[in-house]
Each structure stands twice: as C-alpha cells, then as structure tokens.
Image (tube, rainbow, N blue to C red):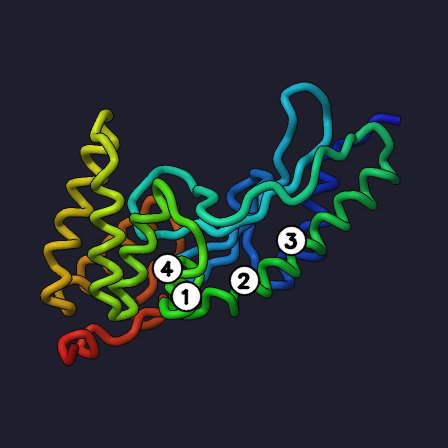
Amino acid sequence: MDFDHNKLIAQVAKQTLLPAGLKRKGKSRLYYDDNGWWCTIVEFQPSGFSKGSYLNVGVSWLLYEREGFGFNIGYREDGFSSAENESEFTNAIFEMAMKAKEIAEKTRERFSTFSKAHEYYQSIKRSSWDYYYAAVIAGMSHQFAAAEENFNSWLAYPELTDWQRVANSRSRKLMNLLSSPKEFAEAVIQVVLNSRALHRLENKEPMLLGFPSVEEFSKN
C-alpha cells in the first residue's frame, strides 16, 4: 500500500525533534537547532532515484553571510533507507530522528562557547573554510595570534573565483580589526545578525545569541 513518506518523516520529527527544541525549516525535510551564532542542522535528505531518506547532521556556523545552511562540521550519519515498506521505513526514520536528537543535544554543549569551538579547531587538521571559521572563532576567544595565523592560511589559497574574492575581502577586513578587539567583536556580531536575517531566524539581541558583552573585548 502506498503512503506519504514525507508526511511520515514530518510526523516522526514532530514527535522527537520539536520537543527537543529543534524547528522545522518551512515545509522542508530540514530541521535546525538555533544556538545563536550557529545551528545544528538535521536533514532527512531525499534521493533523486527512489523514495526514502538519508540522515545528515552537522554544524552550520553563522559567521559568514551565505544563502542556505552549510555543513561546516559533520554531514552524513546514516545511509539511504527506502520507503517501500511503511512499517520498516517508520522504524528507520524514528531511529534516525532519535540519533539526530542525541547529536543535537550533545553538540549544544560541545560548542556552547567560542572557547570550546576554538579548542575543537585547534585539535583538527584544517583546510579550506576551516581556516576562516577557525580564525573568526579564535578572535572571539581572544586568541588573536591564532586568529591571524588562520586568516593568513585562508588567504594563502589562490583567488580564482568571485566568491573567493568576496570571502577574502571579508577576511582581510576582520583580520585588520584584530588589533581593536571591540571593533572585531562588533563586526562579527553584525555578520551573525546578517546571517540570521538571511536564514529568517528569530531576531534576537546579541547577548541572547551567546555573545559575551562587547565591552569585555575593549579590556583586552
């Protein structure tokens, strides 16, 4: 018997993810956990070949203005589950949703402060966008030497495309503000506010987005 697998996913997510604080992005199969300057993204990704779902879970930093959420940390958690059998698919989606809920709750604590996010980036081998995000996070953690080092690593990549030129321009502006921590913090906060507006996230004051007081940066 045929069934609406998209409706089933929404029903399971409503029972498991929404009570845990996640929200649905419109009528899509994407859910997000809003943590101020970053979100955990849960995506029940469809296939272009058959009905069913993959599970993708990861962190999307809001530290650079862009259309659509990205997976800056994490991505594919579960392979494809076919929606041929309603009972089997229901069980599979429930297991996916419970796994996603557990990851989201653990990730809230894992990256609850800029300092914890900085420790993460210091512990991994970085490349590409890792350098940009590591630089911004280091600066917000008052680790200005590490921030400058990561900005320079990011800027060392060949500037071949329009998006790279835009990203490099943003990076240079932020790097030049590292000597004025308060102005650096204000610039980053504005980037996050812009990103939240692009994603149509709730408008909140910076102090409610997990940022320390800007005045604290003027003391460093």
- Res. 17 image quadrant: bottom right
Kindly report which numbered mark, 1 or 4, lies closer to the viewer in this rendering. Answer: 1
Give the x, y percent position of residue 147.
24, 59
Q: Which sits earlier in the primary sequence, circle 1 or circle 4?
A: 4
Q: CA distance from mark 2 to mark 3?
A: 10 Å
- Return the residue at label 4: 37
**Residue ID at (37%, 47%):** 130
Q: Residue at x 26, y 61 (%)?
A: 146
Q: Amino acid at mark 2?
A: Thr
Asked if 169 appears above or below 49 in the picture, the reply is below
Residue denoted by label 1: 119
According to the picture, the residue beneath numbered tag 2 turns out to be 107
* For the residues bearing labels 2 and 3, Cβ distance under 8 angstroms: no
Tell me how far mark 3 sits from mark 1, CA to CA: 23 Å
Closer to the chain start, of discs 3 and 1, is 3
What amino acid does circle 3 point to? Ala
Residue at image location 83% in from the left, 28% down from the top: 84
Q: Are marks 3 and 4 in contact (CB under 8 Å)?
A: no
In the picture of the structure, the residue carrying the numbered disc 3 is: 100
Query: What residue is drawn where x is 21% and y is 41%?
Result: 155
Residue 51 percent across, percent down from the top left: 73, 26
Q: Disc 1, disc 4: CB below 8 Å?
A: no
